[in-house]
Amino acid sequence: MRTSSPLQQAPEQSARRVDADLVVLGVEVVLVAAAVGVGMVLNARGVGLHADAAPIYATWRPHVGWGTPAALLVAAGVVGWGARWARTARWGRLLVAGYLAAVAWTMSLALVDGWSAGFTQRLTPQAEYLHEVPAITDIPATVAGFSARILDFQPDSWSTHTAGHPPGALLAFVVLDRVGLGGPTAAALACVLVGATVTVSVPVALRALGAAQSARTVLPFLVLLPGSVWVGVSADGIFAGVVAAGLALLAVRGRVAAVAGGLLLGVALYLSYGFVLVGIAALAVLVLRSRDRWPALLAGLAGAGAVVLAFTLAGFWWLDGYHLVVERYYQGWGADRPYGYWVWANLAALVVCAGPVLGPALRRTARAAVRPARSAAAAWRGSSRHRVIGLLDALRAAGPTVLLPLAAALMVSAANLSGLSKAEVERIWLPFVVWLLVATAHLPPRAHRWWLAGQALTALAVNHLLWTVS
C-alpha cells in the first residue's frame, strides 16, 4: 500500500488550513453583509439604531478626496514591501518606519474627507470634549464636581462624550490647551500621533515577552489597521495609545518600567470605564513575564493605585461615576438601540475595524491554544496547589501570540455582553483590537501580502463609501 511521505503531507495540510481560512473569511463576509442588510431593514422600519450605515456609526456617502492618492501610495508600499522588510530590518529602524507609516496611513485616510471635515473639525461638535474645554477654569473643582454633571436633562449636564467617560478624558484635552496646544487642529494631531504609537508598543511588548520574530510579523498589520479610520480622528486613538504603552511597559523587564506601566493603566481607568477590562490583558502580560512576576505585579499595582488615590482625593470616586454613566446611557440612545441586533452586529463592526484577517488569524490562534489547554485541563485534576502551578505553566507555554489575543477576545466579549457597547464599537474597541491582531503572527508568511492587501482595501472601502462619525 502506497503512503505519502511527510514532505508530501505538509503541503496537503497547509492547503487544508488555507481552505479553512477562506471558509472563515466567508463567514466574516456573511456576518458583515447580514448586519448591513438587517440594519437597513430596521432603519427603514424606524427602529432606533441611530446608525444610518449600521453596523457602522456613519452615513452612506461615496466620495473621494485629496487624501485618496496618498492612502493608495502608503497601502501599496506596505503591501508590496512591508512584510518582507519587517523580517530583516534593524529593530530600531523598523519601529521608526512603522510608526511613520502608521501616521501617514491614518492622516491620508482622514484627509479623504478633507482637511476641515476629515481632520480639524472632527472634535468640535457639541457632543465632543473640545466643546467643554473653554469653560474649564479650575481643574480641581472640575474633578471634584464631575459626577454631579453626568446625568442628562439638567442645565449644566456634560456633553455626551464627556459625560460618558471619567474626567481623565476631558482633562487630556484641557492639559493640551494649558500647554499651548489648544484648538481642534492640535487635538486632532494628538489623536493621530498618540494613536499611531500602538505600532511601537505592541511589538515592543511581544519582543519583551520573548516573541521577537512575531513582533516583526505583526507590525505591518498594525500599520494598515482598518481601525485607523477612527484613530483619525477620535479620542479613542489616544486611549488606544495609552493602553498599549501601559501594557508594553508592564512587559518590559524592570520595576521602574512596571511602575510606569501601572501609572499609564491607572490613567486609562480614568479615560474610559470600560478599561477596567484591560486588567485581563495586564494579568496575561504578567503571567508571560520570564521573571520578577510578583515584584512587577506589586510595582504595577502601586503605579495604578497612585492614580486612583489621586483622583479619589481630588473628589472623584470611580464607582460613583460608573453607576451614573450607566444611568445616563439609558437616558439617551442606549435605551433605543436594540440589544438583540447590536449584540451580534457589534461583531460585524469589529471585523470591519480589525479587518478580514481577524477571523483566520484567530482560528489559527485557537488551534495553537489546544495543546496548552489540554495541559491546563490535566493539571486541573491534581491538588489545589498543583492546579495553580499547572495552569500558570500552561498559560506561559501558550506564549504571547496565543495568550494576548485570547485575553483581548475575552475583553471584547465582556464589553459586548454588558449591553453598554451597543454601536460605535469600531472606535470604542480600538484599544482591544490592536491586541487581537497579535494573532496574525500565526499566519503563513506566504499569505501575508494578500492579507495586508485585504486590510488596506477594507479601510479604503470604508473611508470612501461611508462618512464616518467620531
Image (cartoon, rainbow, N blue to C red):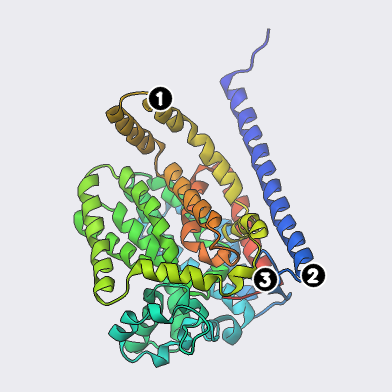
**Are the residues tagged 2 and 1 within 8 Å (C-beta)?**
no
| Left or right, residue 389 beside residue 378 | left
Mark 2 or 1: the one toward you: 2
Q: Amino acid at mark 1?
A: Ala
Q: Amino acid at mark 3?
A: Ala
Quarter assignment of residue 121: bottom right
Q: Is residue 136 left or right of residue 428?
A: left
Locate residue 354: give its quadrant. bottom right
Crowd tier of the residue under label 2, counting other residues whose Cα lies within 10 Å: few below 14, some 14–19, many 20 or above: few
Q: Quadrant of the N terminus?
A: top right
Q: Amino acid at mark 2?
A: Ala
Which numbered tag is attached to residue 368?
A: none
- From mark 3 to mark 2, how far is it between C-alphas? 12 Å
Residue 165: image x %, image y %?
Answer: 44, 72
Residue at mark 1: 378
Looking at the image, is mark 3 or mark 2 earlier in the sequence? 2
Q: Which residue is mark 2?
A: 44
**Is residue 314 left or right of 463 when viewed as pictured?**
left
Image point (60%, 84%), residue name: 117
User: From where the camera sits, is residue 382 visible?
Assistant: yes
